[in-house]
Image (cartoon, grey):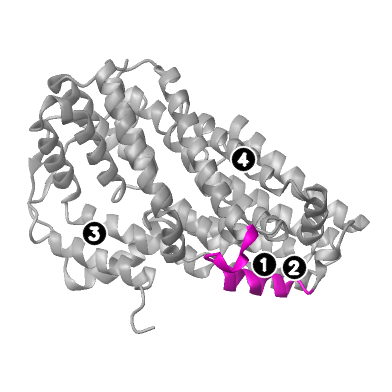
Amino acid sequence: MASRVPHVFVILFSVILLAALATYIVTPGEYDRAADANGRMIAVDGSYHPVEAENIGFMSVFESIYTGMVAASDIIFYIFVVGGSFGILLSTNVVQGAVGSISQKMEGREKLIIPVLMIFFALSGAMLGLAEETIAYITILIPLMLRLGFDSMTGAAIVLVGTSVGFTTAFMNPFTVGVAQGIAELPLFSGMGFRIIMWAVFLVISIWYVMRYASKIKKNPEASHTFESDRALKDAENGEQQVASLSGRQKLVLFILLAAIVMLAVGVTQWGWYLKEIAGLFLLMGILAGIAGKLSFNQIAESFIEGCRTIVMGALVVGVARGILVILEDGKILDTILYGLANAVGTLPAALTAIGMYIVQALANFIIPSGSGQAAVTMPIMAPLGDLVGVTRQTAVLAFQLGDGISNIFTPTSGYFMAGLALAGISWIKWVKWIWPLILIHYTLGAVFVTIAHIIGYQ
């Protein structure tokens, strides 16, 4: 093939260069920041002012990648610890044995597992705001999907698409809806009925999209986007698919895995666990699983390193992507970009203002990948802007959550998404080729729901 799609590192570094160039073109400026009632530092509407230029120098372009790595170190090391821990688990062969049993029991009804799991992950995203916390399940689901006759793309999609739909259309997400409504001075989780309907519509269409692809792969495995890499995974199993029962030691390892999953759910929902605690849990799980699986301490260490080795590129992508935000912040043009977008929305006809807000939030998410961070920067500006142009604050929040969420499983600046692809062993380019029609459907649905909300005066 004469031409190839650029490597994801090439794409990200090109964006870093463009961001650095923009610091010489875009007028630098900032919003004042003030603490809200909950102690969050938020932008003060109407406080935008020009500041002295901070042009990014030649060396700063390269230094931004290191700075981005440091800023994203929590996610990067989380990826390594989880990947290494599952490397230990896989060395015990318990996953292969367990999915062998499940595949036999699900024979003839394989596709039913897809909607059941996607509903579970969508509820996790919608009610608990889970995102990074769910990607560890990818390592468990991919062997199961391969054994059931599907592919790695299906396994990754169940988790990433299911969680993203829930996070995007959330009716109770404390990190997006909760923060945005608090800043917009709306009752917490008000307007839930409209969002539940939206959640159901997004989820049904997403399940259809994944199941349609899974059916095609079941009939013709060579149509898979991950056919070559999946074939290598299957070959590496060395014919262990005939395993129909688990040994006593493997049952103990499986119990340790299930206990870790239960602890994960309890820790996140009841004790406020985040990346540090989850990483510690999975590291403990990996060590205990290795001991129960009769691995020597040296084998446990080697398996951990092998698990890390397989996800190095994906982990590093997270840090390189963060370098874009570093450049925009250091060059003091991030707020200028937001200020320009907000002014553009204010000049639109009243009927199009809500859609304009939606577009602004969608664009903002490419440079501010944190949902709560984007809310803190944009909502203090968008909420009063909505008052001026006749858009309800509830609609402004809806525009934010949809604009913030949809691209989370598309843009390479999304840390947890790139971590999920790393654990799945799927390149960003392959994922984009598979997901882009669904992303277009989601953006179209988002525009429809924002328009309906504006028309009905959503409160």
According to the image, label 3 marks what residue? 327
> Which comes before the other along the chain, label 4 or label 3?
4
Real-space Cα distance between discs 2 and 3?
40 Å
According to the image, label 1 marks what residue? 304
According to the image, label 2 marks what residue? 300
Label 4 crowding class (10 Å Cα cut-off): few <14, some 14-19, many 20+? some
* Viewport quadrant of the C terminus: top left
According to the image, label 4 marks what residue? 115
Q: Residue at x 67, y 56 (%)?
A: 145
Of helix, strand and loop, which one carries label 2?
A: helix
Label 2 crowding class (10 Å Cα cut-off): few <14, some 14-19, many 20+? many
Give the residues drawn in magenta, as a range: 218-238
Image position of 351 with respect to 417: above or below? above
Real-space Cα distance between discs 1 and 3?
34 Å
Considering the whole magenta stretch, tell me its main secondary structure: helix
Q: Say what amino acid the circle numbered 1 marks.
A: Phe
Tell which of 115 and 300 is nearer to you: 115
Q: Say what amino acid the circle numbered 3 marks.
A: Ile
Tell which of 373 and 53 is nearer to you: 373
Q: Where is residue 454 in the image (x, y as percent from the top left)?
A: 25, 22
Q: How many marks can you see?
A: 4
